[in-house]
Image (cartoon, rainbow, N blue to C red):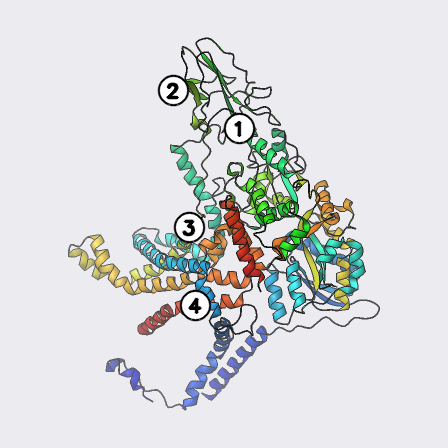
Amino acid sequence: MASTSVGAEFPDDVRTPPAPRVPRYRSVLIPLSFLAPALLLLGVWVIYPAVATVKRSFYDDRDESNFVGLGNWHKMFSDEIFRTAFKNNVIWILVAPIAVTLLGLVLAVLIERISWASLFKIVLFMPLAISLFAVGVIWRIVYTQDPDQGLLNAGTKAIHDIFVKPGVLPGAQPGEGLSSSFTLTKPIEAGGVAKLAVTGIAPEDVPSDAKQAVNPKPEEGKITGVVWRDFKPGGGKPGVVEKQEVGISGATVTLLKNGDKTTTQTTGADGSFTFDDVSGGGYTAQIAPETFRAPWAGVEWLGPKLVTPSIIIAFLWTAVGFAMVIIGAGLSAIPRDVLEAARTDGAKEFQIFRRVTIPLLWPVLTVVIVTEIIGVLKIFDVIYAIAPGSVRDDATTLAFEMWRRSFSGENRFGFGAAIATFLMILFLPFLVYQVRSQRKNA
Amino acid sequence: MRKSVGLALIAAATLCLAVVAQGATAKHPASADHATAVNGTVTILADWTGAEGKSFQAVLDGFKKKNPNVTVKYKPSTDIASALSTAVQGGNPPDLAAIPNPGLMKDFANRGALKPITFARNTVASNYTKDWVKLGTVNGKLYGVFFKGANKSTVWYNVHSFKNAGVKPPKDWKAVIAAAKTLRASGTKAYSLGGADGWTLTDLFENLYIRAANPSKYDQLTQHAIKWTDPSVIATLKLMAQVLSDKDNIAGNPLQTDFPKSVTNVFQPKNPKAAMTFEGDFVPGVAAGQTKAKAKTDYNVFPFPAVNGRGGDYVVGGGNVVVMFKDSAAARALVSYLASPQAGEIWAKRGGFSSPNKNVKASVYPDDITRTTASALAKASTFRFDLSDLAPAAFGSKDMFADLQAFLKNPSSVTATAAKLEKHAKAAYKK
């Protein structure tokens, strides 16, 4: 039976020869029997659950027999967290596939030119071999805010501390009689005494050679004072120099007259200091606040604002390898003589890239982008692994919401089914496009 | 041509059969019992894996010694609520299950999925205080017995930090706030909160509420018979805000600190990031894997303090209740065994376990600290189950967390938080 419908599209020399004469039922039965196991699996595990889920979305959350029509759908669209999830999905679709493709393109082009290309390709492809959940666990540790634990913040802290050094006595607080800027609140006169009490100094921050603080004695024409750790076990009396309370040596004290800085002194071994040649009043003393600067807490990578970009970066780390390999294959399919011709015509490398390579690569790039969009629409494992409980509402996506409502104990199956069906509807245009373009290329 | 077609058809048919056979699971129920010796198979589902799983297996081995003709199959599952819901819906539940949530037990009992364990009534009554017995009762019938318990009314502290500050374990909430001030002045932050894991915040609320209000109000709030905007709730939120608003006195960023980190913050022997953490008796188990802290020398525990003189000995806690889905002589024997003190003692000896059974000898616990917390659990005059575990999951395991986390972010929003909690509770308790 000659199939003229196929032959009509192609020129005569490539038309398929007429098929041998076989009874019609046979030519259907044989392929069908080979397809049967796969069709059975598909029917049981894919088609039936999909149809059942769509059906389930029209029934009550927990009571399968109670028909509620569009009730779940209405609830879904008016749910604030669902709207956040949808917004996040839109962000993911707009950012991730394009970023993956661009990075993959750049890497593919650059790697082509270096000598150990295969090795680099393997290294960049490796993250794809790890499950997305494992990727999430790794990056959760990287993003931890505490600089002692999080890899990223350990680095940012190191850089931050070059410019803004943490104080020698981090976390200390002004004691009795001092303002928040470690300045004496009550002004003193010449011959007066400045007692600068500091609390909140951890015992391990006290130098081992610290000496007992002494109550400063007033001296004519001078201002004497002491900077000391105003704490002893049990607390002690605030503002009073007591036994077991040590002086803080090496601290910088500034003398202010009517608010203007005059001179500075450094405290001695027992925390005492003296300002000579003072007269009149309106004096106050201040300890340099940099001494007490608390250590930097690190960037909140997993806070509500940065969590989605952070998770997207973790995803990129995995997916770029895939894009790079596919695009690399596409690149090597470009005929060399086209590029050579462009070069002899005097085109610069970047011009060649923009006007020759990319148009020739366009089909490959499209395939990568659409594949990534489909993969990103259902993103779940990285969200589950990376987002801490306190930001789940900010980092959520549609697939994550579906899981949360249905399976994480809430058991709202109707609502979850509605989300799943909605997600399926979102997929359809991309799936149709993907299938169509494959048919065209076949 | 014919031969290859025939072969192809046979191959396809075999493949189909293989697929179908793999998918089908044959389940044969436990066999009948004899009048003299108990025999048969019992399946039990619980969420103990790893080291805990091994310990539970040791408990089951003790059962096997007494009943050599019974085969016990232990199936660990990390997501018990889901696994059981699916199994019950599919008509294929295990014989027994140890579930961490009496609310789930009530749910199953009301659906008719559970069989009452009235045969064990006497064993349970003689081994447990009335609060524990009541927890296993639904509509007047006994459905469950508690095998493992957790005391959540404990506060763990770093011994060195307390010594440096000259602070003694406070016995009243006011003393806690005063101690926190002294600790900060001594150079160590007072509080370690695992705010990223919302349940730590719900535990703090519950411990404060049962003491600031009273146990009967606690029960009313659990059933949503009083609203979350009730003045007693507002008063408790204000007490909680005393800790949450003292931001300079909390280690790190509490919203980004998860529970294990909140424990290591306190337990690291040198330079702890904070001096105390309000969490349950499972805390040392977490710390053991991550720090080298030693009991009594590096860390210690005191009971959650009274509020205005009330509740110094109250215990809010959790536990795993053993319920029966399918009745059989073997299943009954296992239930009775788990209700006996001998079963608890096997695991208690191994550590990481507190038994709610009041007849478990205190001497079997491996150390003083466990002995104290476990005795408090089993012998408490007033015991209440964790409110967030008893509430409907949508509220108790999700919305309550989120609302309290928002409260942690903004501790001055007491009335707004109460309103949010009420809104979410109303929606969840409706079903």
Closer to the chain start, of discs 2 and 4, is 2
Circle 4 residues within 10 Å: few <14, some 14–19, many ≥20: some
Q: Residue at x 64, y 72 (%)?
A: B91
In the rendered image, residues at marks 1 and 3 fall on the same chain? yes
| x, y percent for residue B90 | 61, 71
Marks 1 & 3, CB-CB < 8 Å contact: no
The subunit letter for the residue under badge 3 reads: A
In the rendered image, residues at marks 2 and 1 fall on the same chain? yes
Quarter of the image where the N terminus of chain B is located: bottom left
- Mark 1–mark 3 Cα distance, whole angstroms, equals 35 Å
In the rendered image, residues at marks 2 and 4 fall on the same chain? yes
Circle 1 residues within 10 Å: few <14, some 14–19, many ≥20: many
Circle 1 is placed at which residue position? A201
- Mark 4–mark 1 Cα distance, whole angstroms, equals 57 Å
Q: Is residue A106 above or below residue A177?
A: below
Q: Amino acid at mark 4?
A: Phe
Quadrant position of residue B370: top right
Determine which of the numbered discs, if any, sits on residue A422 in the image: 4
Q: Is residue A355 above or below residue A186?
A: below
Circle 2 is placed at which residue position? A258
Q: Nearer the viewer, mark 2 or mark 3?
A: 2
| x, y percent for residue A62 | 56, 68
Asked whether A32 or A112 is in front, the reply is A32
The subunit letter for the residue under badge 2 reads: A
Q: Amino acid at mark 3?
A: Ser
Q: Amino acid at mark 1?
A: Ile
Q: Amino acid at mark 2?
A: Asn
